[in-house]
Structures are given as C-alpha cells and as structure tokens.
Amino acid sequence: VPTALPALTLSEKLQARAARVNFDWPDTSFVYDKLAEELEEFRAEEKSGDQARMTAELGDILFVLANLARHNGIDPEMALRATCDKFKRRFRYMEQIVANNNENMIDKSLNELDALWDEAKGLEDQ
C-alpha cells in the first residue's frame, strides 16, 4: 500500500488488505463497538491533557471511522472533502448575512451563529 496516500485513504487501503486475509470484523456492529471504545479512551486522555496520548487516540478514532467507511463502500476521503465543502458553503452564507447587516461575526453570540448555521442548513435541505 503506497504510504504517500492521504491518511484516510491509506487507512482504508490498509484495512482492505488485512480483510483479504480475514483480519476483519464480519459486520459493522463490531466497528461501532470499537468506535465507542476508542471514544472513551480519547475522553480519558483528554482529561489528562496529555497531547501525545490524545493524538494517538484521535488517530485510532479516525482509523476506525475509515474502517466504517470501508465496510459501507464509502470513500472516506471523498466523504470528508464533501463535508468540508458543505461547511465552507454554510459558513460563507453566515458571513454574507452578517456582512449584509453591517455586523461582525466576532460580535455574534454562539446562539446567534447557530441560528444562522441552521438557516444555511435549511436552505441546502430544500
């Protein structure tokens, strides 16, 4: 497996290769269990504040998520890129609305920004 691939793609490819020799869970219920375990481990490390251990646990979470994507035939890199694009569109909408009202984003409360986010999301869902 080429190591120059983006990390999510690399993790999916590594797991696909392991699956070819039956080192794989039979269904996603096991993946969800592993994800819950890894999230708990991250929470524990987050409380400790140890950045190196938090980084390792976050890597484990992302690795499990790539496995979940593989089990469902989803390209994790494309899924994340699509979500980033969606975030950018919604955030730009928020910025535009605030600018049109001659206001600044930094002066808005989280509740006000969440309302604008929901508005942007609602427009996309139509």
Image: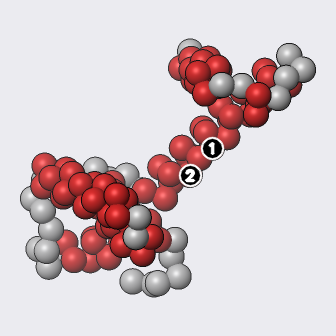
* Residue at image point 50% right, 51% down: 80
Residue 50, horizontal then vertical, whole percent: 40, 70
Residue for badge 2? 81
Q: Residue furthest front?
A: 48
Can you tell which quarter of the image residue 51 is in? Answer: bottom left
Q: Nearer the viewer, residue 78 or 43?
A: 43
Q: Nearer the viewer, residue 66 or 42?
A: 42
Q: Up-down: is 70 above or below 102?
A: below
Can you tell which quarter of the image residue 16 is in? Answer: bottom left
In which quadrant of the rendered image does the C terminus lie?
A: top right
User: Helix, strand or loop at disc 1?
Assistant: helix
Q: Nearer the viewer, residue 111 or 64?
A: 111
Can you tell which quarter of the image residue 82 is in? Answer: top right
Residue for badge 1? 85
User: Which residue type carries mark 2?
Assistant: Arg
In which quadrant of the rendered image does the N terminus lie?
A: bottom left
Asked if marks 1 and 2 touch (Cβ < 8 Å), the reply is: yes
User: Which residue type carries mark 1?
Assistant: Asp
Q: Residue furthest right?
A: 102
Residue 13, horizontal then vertical, whole percent: 35, 72
Left or right of residue 21, residue 8 in this image: right
